[in-house]
Image: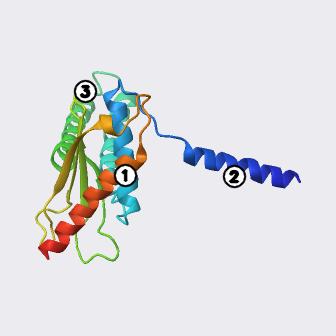
Amino acid sequence: MTDKKGDTIASSTTSNSKNTPKKANLLDHHSIKHLLDESVTEIVTGKGFIEDVRMSNVRLLMGSIIIIIALFAQFYNKKFPENRNFLIGCIVLYILFNGILQLIIHTKEKNAILFTHPPAESFSSTGLVVSSKLPRFSDMYTLTIASADPDSISAKPQVEFTKSVTQWFTKDGVLVEGLFWKDVEGLVNEYTRESKKSK
């Protein structure tokens, strides 16, 4: 009897968590964009595109190296000025790796929120780069889908839409997922159609 009650409570908790509406602070630009970007990722990966985490792993690796350099500089067992050359070396390495990290972010990632591998059943050798923009003090959200490798033979023309976020949220900040899903899925389908046309 107890087990059945426990199962009932667990199942109801799970269903409640699935039915919990997604909500953003409409006065917070970052809150709105973060919620929309997360939803886009869910929709695109739900269409069979597997997330490519290599770029994220590179960023994590570079960030870890930068932190280790800073910790070595902070806790080196010699006092200044004996550790002067060591500190200079740490500063140079810190600037170098931080510069490389910023270069990766600005040249590779830009406004990207998702990198993917091509779907398993696809003949394409390149995945997607999904990017988004929501300028500050603006309600216009731009979503772009493009090939992850624009120089590839199988690269396809990018597609995008720019729409007001006001059509996807209630006055309480709850995301109307059905409307947003329809728009994003339509863009993914448009990219797929462009891919078929260009073959």
Residue type, numbered disc 2: Ser
The answer to which of 25 and 118 lies nearer the viewer is: 25
Kindly identify which numbered label has been placed on residue 78. none
Q: Which residue is mark 3?
A: 84
Q: Is residue 4 left or right of residue 157?
A: right
Q: Could you tell me how far apart the alpha carbons at marks 3 and 2 are, in whole angstroms?
A: 62 Å
Indicate the quadrant where residue 87 lies: top left
Disc 2 target residue: 11
In the rendered image, is residue 64 in sight?
A: no
Q: Secondary structure at mark 1?
A: helix
Q: Earlier in the sequence, mark 3 or mark 1?
A: 3
Q: Position of residue 107 (x, y in %)?
A: 15, 47
Instruction: Report, in whole angstroms, how far the alpha carbon at label 2 lies from the one at label 1.
Output: 26 Å
**What type is the residue that disc 3 sits on?**
Arg
Residue 16 in view here: yes
Q: Residues within 10 Å of mark 2 (few under 14, many from 20)?
A: few
Viewer-nearest of labels 3 and 1?
1
| Residue closest to the eye, 163 or 24 | 163
Q: Which residue is mark 1?
A: 181
- Residue shown at 30% from the left, 21% from the top: 80
Amino acid tagged 1: Trp
From the top left corner, tell me how far across and down residue 128 is, in percent: 25, 60
